[in-house]
Image: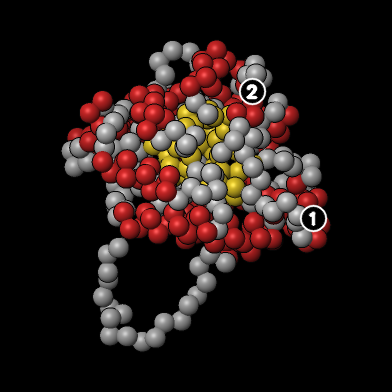
């Protein structure tokens, strides 16, 4: 990844693609989109990318992001299964053949010094490096020491600062803090709450080097976000320690964040950017938009968020964009008739 990510679509677009550009002519026309869902919802992400990129070259997914569970990553919705090296290799090969960039997301800001040399984590990065013929892949890290270690060991892979690094920050988040991170990282993700602070983001001198999260599920003013994240970090080390699970559940119940609704005066709101907020960020020079999926339990919510955020849904165009969205989602799980088999009643755990 360069400072200004390369477009995913080919230099020459088809007439069909060109004729549809009016759908986003007034809404983030030259934006670049990163979709988190790799190593969790790969089949759905790849199918959606094919449906939107082939037909809508102007608004395709340029980069996918994610990581299997390891000491350097967190699980927000429950413990996930570990991928084998052969599975990692096969998946990266498929993305490579489709000319899709992959960003490995290591979003755990609580990595101990003894965990910096985790064998499984380094296997993931080594495989990413081995399948990076086009130079599209990158690392996204929430821990400074881990970022420096990976930077030294894998100098050809750009290292991005994950927003959990900023969630873990104890001091005030200021333009000076962001500028200091820009000196250490290839790119920096804005803390989701800072994407609605014009006084902060307009003071950033290189907005093209920042990624904006468009669909953060946490409350914009969550009082326990840092504490919750550190509990998840402890759970990574001790996944079967039940008291950690109970503590995390109590935090969620205390702030009642699961009942949060759309922005209404006096009502708790999640960190979803409105159309106006996204346009203000675009006008300020931001071009890279990140659709998070780590906080979701299913792929349909993630993919709907991407379609909701990437397309222009103003009333005059909503009939066309809704047709595109429904068509893309309907193609994800087509009915496939199965032959009657004596194995039908068996349930195989994946």
Name the foreground residue: 69 vs 137. Answer: 137
Count of numbered tags: 2
At horizontal 80% and vertical 60% (from top left) the residue drawn is 15
Split into 4 quadrants, where in the image is the N terminus?
top right
Q: Position of residue 335 (x, y in %)?
A: 50, 75
Name the foreground residue: 184 vs 282. Answer: 184
Q: Is residue 226 left or right of residue 188?
A: left
Q: Earlier in the sequence, mark 2 or mark 1?
A: 1
Disc 1 crowd, CA 10 A, few/some/many (<14, 14-19, 20+):
some
Distance CA(mark 2)–CA(mark 1): 30 Å
2 is higher (above) or lower (below) than 93: above
Split into 4 quadrants, where in the image is the C terminus?
bottom left
Task: Say how the picture is coloured.
Answer: secondary structure
Name the foreground residue: 91 vs 130. Answer: 130
Q: Position of residue 12 (x, y in %)?
A: 76, 54
The residue under label 1 is 18
Q: Quadrant of residue 30?
A: top right
Name the foreground residue: 262 vs 195. Answer: 195
Q: Quadrant of residue 291?
A: top right
At horizontal 40% and vertical 59% (from top left) the residue drawn is 90
At horizontal 20% and vertical 37% (from top left) the residue drawn is 238
- Circle 2 SS class: loop
Q: Position of residue 279 (x, y in %)?
A: 71, 34
- Circle 1 SS class: helix
Residue 98 seen:
yes
58 is higher (above) or lower (below) than 159: below
Disc 2 crowd, CA 10 A, few/some/many (<14, 14-19, 20+):
some
Q: Quadrant of residue 150?
A: top left
The residue under label 2 is 206
Q: Position of residue 229 (x, y in %)?
A: 35, 30
Q: Is residue 257 left or right of residue 45?
A: left
User: Contact (CB < 8 A) between labels 2 and 1?
Assistant: no
């Amino acid at each position: 990844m360069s400072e200004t990510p390369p477009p995913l679509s080919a230099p020459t677009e088809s007439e069909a693609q060109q004729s549809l550009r009016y759908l986003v002519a007034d809404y983030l026309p030259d934006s670049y989109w990163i979709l988190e869902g790799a190593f969790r919802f790969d089949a759905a992400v790849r199918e959606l990318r094919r449906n939107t990129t082939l037909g809508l070259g102007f608004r395709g997914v340029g980069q996918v992001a994610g990581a299997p569970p390891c000491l350097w990553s967190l699980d927000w919705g429950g413990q996930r299964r570990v991928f084998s090296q052969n599975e990692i290799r096969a998946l990266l090969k498929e993305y490579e053949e489709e000319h899709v960039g992959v960003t490995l997301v290591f979003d755990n800001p609580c990595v101990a010094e003894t965990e910096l040399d985790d064998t499984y984590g380094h296997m993931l990065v080594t495989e990413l490096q081995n399948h990076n013929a086009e130079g599209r892949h990158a690392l996204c890290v929430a821990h400074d020491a881990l970022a420096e270690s990976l930077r030294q060991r894998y100098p050809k892979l750009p290292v991005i600062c994950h927003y959990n690094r900023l969630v873990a920050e104890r001091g005030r988040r200021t333009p000076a803090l962001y500028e200091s991170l820009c000196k250490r990282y290839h790119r920096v993700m804005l803390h989701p709450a800072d994407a609605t602070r014009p006084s902060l983001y307009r003071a950033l001198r290189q907005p093209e080097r920042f990624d904006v999260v468009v669909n953060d599920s946490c409350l914009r003013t969550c009082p326990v976000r840092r504490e919750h994240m550190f509990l998840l970090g402890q759970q990574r080390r001790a996944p079967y320690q039940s008291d950690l699970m109970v503590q995390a559940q109590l935090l969620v119940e205390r702030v009642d964040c699961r009942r949060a609704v759309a922005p209404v005066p006096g009502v708790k709101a999640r960190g979803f950017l409105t159309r106006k907020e996204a346009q203000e960020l675009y006008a300020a020079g931001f071009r890279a938009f990140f659709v998070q999926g780590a906080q979701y339990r299913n792929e349909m919510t993630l993919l709907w968020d991407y379609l909701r955020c990437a397309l222009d849904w103003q009333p005059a165009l909503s009939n066309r964009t809704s047709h595109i969205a429904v068509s893309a989602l309907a193609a994800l799980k087509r009915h496939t008739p199965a032959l009657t088999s004596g194995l039908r009643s068996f349930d195989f755990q994946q």
